[in-house]
Image (cartoon, rainbow, N blue to C red):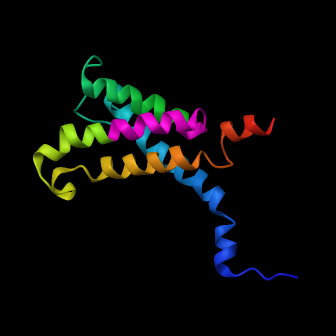
Amino acid sequence: MTTQTPDSRLASRAPEMLSVLRIVSALIFLLHGSQKLFAFPPTDQQPPLASLMGVGGVLELIGGLLLLAGLFTRPVAFVLSGMMAVAYWMFHAPGSLYPTLNGGDAAILYCFVFLYIFVAGPGPWSLDAMMRRR
């Protein structure tokens, strides 16, 4: 009989935690899109749809919903990771060298979380995993 160490017990939950990371990140991310497109949660900022911010809002909302469901996870995560890198360098970095001062810390974090999801996949709690099992 083998005994599990605390490390091995935690490691055995890693696939499910990958799904949790994807779901929570997607929920928060899609709120950025709904705020830009529908002013929900309420905001004074509602960019025109045909602007960079408007297109970003569409990608945030649709990409966030797809990531939330775990559908087309890898290509969506790749696109959103790139989008966040562009957003950081175009809109945040020119303001300051330091992410905590230029407001770009969330963009950097989303970029690398989405890059990780692109590499690691959606986790077991996803439509992608469900379709693979069939």
Q: Quarter of the image holding residue 16? A: bottom right
Q: Magenta span covers which residues?
A: 67-84
Instruction: Give the number of callouts.
Output: 0
| Residue 41 can be seen, yes or no | no
Task: Residue 115 in the image: state x and y as whole percent.
Answer: 45, 46
Task: Residue 119 in the image: state x and y as whole percent.
Answer: 53, 47
Q: Main secondary structure of the magenta part?
A: helix
Give the vertical position of 98 relative to 31 (above or below).
below
Q: Residue furthest left?
A: 95
Task: Residue 89 in the image: state x and y as whole percent.
Answer: 22, 41
Q: Is residue 106 left or right of residue 113?
A: left
Task: Residue 12 in the image: state x and y as whole percent.
Answer: 69, 66
Name the residue nearer the viewer: 69 or 43. Answer: 69
Let me know if residue 79 is in the magenta part. Answer: yes
Q: Is residue 55 left or right of residue 11?
A: left
- Residue at (31% x, 36% y) in the render: 42
- Residue at (58% x, 32% y) in the render: 72
Quadrant in the picture for the C terminus? top right
Give the vertical position of 100 relative to 129 (above or below).
below
Quadrant in the picture for the N terminus? bottom right
Let me know if residue 57 is in the magenta part. Answer: no
Q: Residue furthest front?
A: 119
